[in-house]
Image: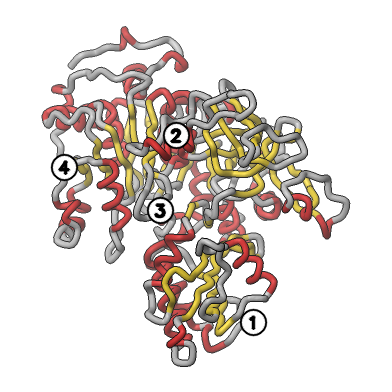
Amino acid sequence: MTNYLSELPDTLLDFSTLVDLLCYRATCQPNQTAYTFLVDGEAEEISITYQELEQRARAIAAYLQSLNAKGERALLLYAPGIEYIAAFFGCLYAGVVAVPAYPPRRNQNMSRLRAIVADAQGMLSLTTTSLLADIQGRFAENPELAAMQWLTTDNITPSLESEWQKTTVSSDTLAFLQYTSGSTGTPKGVMITHGNLLHNSDLIHKCFEHTPSSQGVIWLPPYHDMGLIGGIIQPLYGGFPVTLMSPINFLQKPLRWLQVISRYKATTSGGPNFAYDLCVQKVKPEQLVNLDLSSWEVAFTGAEPIRTQTIEQFASTFADCGFRKEAFYPCYGMAETTLIVSGGFKKAPPVIRQVAKAALEQKRIVAARGEEDSQTIVGCGYNLSNQKIAIVDPESLTLCPADKVGEIWVSGPSVAGGYWNRLEETKQTFHAYLADTGEGPFLRTGDLGFLHNGELFVTGRIKDMIIIRGQNHYPQDIERTVENSHPALRSGCGAAFAVEVEGKERLVIIQEIERNYLRNFDMDEVVKNIAQAVTAEHGLQVYAVVLVKTGSIPKTSSGKIQRHACRSEFLNGTLNVVEDWSENPQCKAKFLHLKTEVDSMLQQLVNSYQQ
């Protein structure tokens, strides 16, 4: 086994790859615990040191090298845990491009997984022995998966690590493909290099002021940028331990998250806005007595709109447990920028600004004069080093004045190289230039916002993207699921969008009825079919379903659904309604049992925190 410690740099900033970084940790801190995974989300622990992790990574890499897999794409299908981490680094050590993906649930449609396999063009898939047994049972209906070469890494002989040979990788080498929550048929793989990962890790390290004494607690899915880069790679970069748990364990019992923070004296943890809301809703007053959250220094929040109400309620609810409002750390980022784009000062409280709601709807920034006309927006921090944030008019492609909302554009070393095998989409998204000055290239985020005194405020999205519980959902995917759920529903004549209900984004479905069904359909059956199909396919709970008359849904002259118009008519009560249903208790009693059915289904699919 070759030892190349002498080749390693003296500082983190000089590392070129994650392989160099893990080798450094394994050599200089061999016995330090790197990752602890709580199998049950509470007490049952599995831990691994830096040295043990590198040994397992080298063994997996040696096996991949024996297959001449360098440069190939390898699908990673694992439950959250140590095996997944070892396989990810095993791919890096072998020069194999990792493709993290959710392991399929029983009875789940596998169209998204098949689409990822087809797009990545990978013939290798890594998993565990137990998961492979489940997946093989579905090979007959999924020939694309059956054609792949399947490898189980939990039974690779540890002694194989001595056969690993150092492979040539650099900062420009592709490390993994981060598949976005894109259209089910056409997911896009963001190309993340070692250089992207190290630069973004350095930004996070500085923003959060991490030290070797830091302690992380992460329940976020390791297949997403926040869970993988923030929860697995960042602790390795900073040289501090992290305790991990499955998102299922958190969703089933949010108290577990806070108990783990309390037990391990965590300094860094976080998640989307909804995670904090869940804790406020589900943790009972008598359960607060045994919680100590005084060690929590960075409670990061991002991935969906950050709400002032959530910040205030969480801080108030858990103040007696030692939680400080100043610990909240709103930030902004996305897969296309590796992870973080903007962040604030660690010890400063969240920056909150009130603007005139009517002006904001016209993309103008005007200070609010009264509460009735105001909208509160939480700042997402400042531009970080070696990059630029620009607010650009999406039509003229020129910089917006300070009092105007525009599209958020980003440039810098953390911006990925583009989408795998999608040249045109890469050009449109990653190669944007200002029309008047020619400055660029920039990444077009598709998000709207403005800068005030250097602070970035995110106000909305150009696209019709739906964000619920921190996850992106394309409305056309949900609409397709709905129209196929019952023969009474008219194809291509539905709209899916989100509305805010008591501080949360909730899903609404507007759908035309086929003319020959207008006087002869079972509303109970139709709504039940829609709710169950959307839950099964997208892991979402439907808040309201409105069935409208044939030909009445708003469309453009070219026949495209006008989702914003549908949303406005829904809120204004001006839709041409045939029947409607909502989970709101004030709605029709005969449909209220549907909420219980869907809630039960969601409990069975609690791991629906997915792309």
Residue 333 spot, x, y in % from top left: 54, 38
- Circle 2 residue: 427
Write the residue at 59% across / 41% down. Answer: 299
Give the structural element (helix, strand or loop) at label 3: loop
Q: Is residue 416 left or right of residue 5?
A: right
Write the residue at 44% across / 68% down. Answer: 492
- Circle 3 residue: 183
**Disc 1 and disc 3 in contact, CB within 8 angstroms:** no
Tell me the amino acid under the disc marked 1. Gln
Disc 4 or disc 3, which is closer to the eye? 3
Write the residue at 66% across / 51% down. Answer: 307
| CA separation in Å, label 2 and label 3 | 19 Å
Disc 2 or disc 3, which is closer to the eye? 2
Q: Kindly give the residue lying farthest to the bottom in the view shown.
A: 519
Residue 316 spot, x, y in % from top left: 70, 53
| CA separation in Å, label 4 and label 3 | 28 Å
| CA separation in Å, label 4 and label 1 | 53 Å
- Circle 4 residue: 151
Which of pointers 2 and 4 lies earlier in the amino acid sequence?
Answer: 4
Are there few (<14), some (14-19), or many (20+) residues within 10 Å of tag 1?
few
- Circle 1 residue: 586
**Disc 2 and disc 3 in contact, CB within 8 angstroms:** no
Which of 30 and 586 lies nearest the eye of the viewer? 586
Q: Is residue 400 left or right of residue 301?
A: right
Which of pointers 1 and 3 lies earlier in the amino acid sequence?
Answer: 3
Disc 2 or disc 4, which is closer to the eye? 2
Classify 331 as above or below 185: above
Residue 548 spot, x, y in % from top left: 55, 79
**Disc 2 and disc 4 in contact, CB within 8 angstroms:** no
Picture quadrant of residue 119? top left
